[in-house]
Amino acid sequence: MSANIHAALLVAVMSAVTILLRFLPFLIFRGGNTPAYISYLGGVLPRAIIGMLVIYCLREADLFSAPFALPELISAAVVAGLQRWKRNSLVSIIFGTAIYMLLIRVM
Amino acid sequence: MDTEKKPSLGAGGGVVKKAFIKSAPVLAGYVVLGIGFGILLRDAGYGLLWSLAMSALIFAGSMQYVGVGLLAGGASLISAALTTFMVNARHLFYSISMIGRYRDAGKYKPYLIFALTDETYSLLCDGETPDGADPNLYRFLVSLFDQCYWVTGCVLGSVLGAALPFGTEGIEFSMTALFVASFTEQ
């Protein structure tokens, strides 16, 4: 039971911090204009952060023993290639994930 | 059933349809990613109600995937707060770039801000809204449709996880694929 309470508190903390992050800029810059450097960061940072998230997702891939992270690298390349070609995120994600699920079973 | 339309309902129906069409690209993606999340959460020992609560209250896909690990490992509240901050810090910048657009959103504003996910941001950041429709209602509906897809997927994953005829190992790559696609697109 206490494990469930702790888990509920964890969900509450994740929810509260996420909500805080989404509301904070609106609370800080409520009245006046947004400073130019903040707008600049708003323009360039999302891409950098998404890049970091890709690295974060691949952190457990092992480059130095078989299969040398090949399922991850091949599947990610397939996703990037499909995205460039078709520009349909859904197609890229489903196809890339299917390839990954196949590769980890055969490699 | 009363099928007579009030004068305002025609415009209202139009904006619902347009918002649905706008949100459609996110539909299958959210359902598939949500199912992946529901399965992972279920495998970690947390069933339907947990999946429903997390998708309704957190509504941040990558954080929920990371959150499965936090729940399974019994993380401390402090480390959960710090992890959430780091994984979701990018939302600060989504919000920053929407300050002007959401300034006069009135009663829709709290939900618009709450529901500003990566995908909703990518749908609404071009700032275009259909002619003749209330832009705030339109953005509210797009955001709401997106969360409906997400909650549906998370719940489906939790329910279907046990019944799938094939092993689900590797389904977590859908999150990596989401970010790779998003990175390629920007």
Image (cartoon, helix red, strand yellow):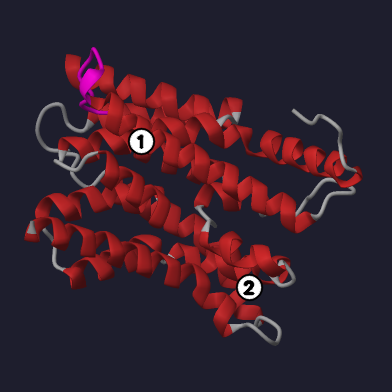
Image side of residue B8 versus residue A54, left or right: right
Q: Is residue A107 visible?
A: no
x then y, percent, for residue B129: 79, 49
Task: Chain letter for mark 2, please.
Answer: A
x then y, percent, for residue A21: 44, 70
Q: Hey, which residue is sitting farthest bottom in the picture?
A: A32
Secondary structure state at the residue bearing disc 2: helix
Magenta highlight on residue A44: no
Residue at which label 2 appears: A39
Q: Which of the 4 quarters of the picture holds residue A7?
A: bottom left
Residue type, label 2: Ser
Residue type, label 1: Val
| Real-space Cα separation, disc 2 to disc 1, in angstroms | 37 Å
Q: Which of the 4 quarters of the picture holds residue B160?
A: top left
Picture residue at 54% right of the left edge, 46% below the top: B119
Total of numbered circles in the picture? Answer: 2
Above-or-below relation of A14 to A88: below
Picture residue at 87% right of the left edge, 47% below the top: B8
Range of the magenta residues? B162-174
Residue at which label 1 appears: B155
Q: Residues within 10 Å of mark 2 (few under 14, many from 20)?
A: some
Q: Quadrant of the N terminus of chain A?
A: bottom left
Secondary structure state at the residue bearing disc 1: helix
Which residue is nearer to you in this view: B160 or A89? B160
x then y, percent, for residue B95: 57, 67
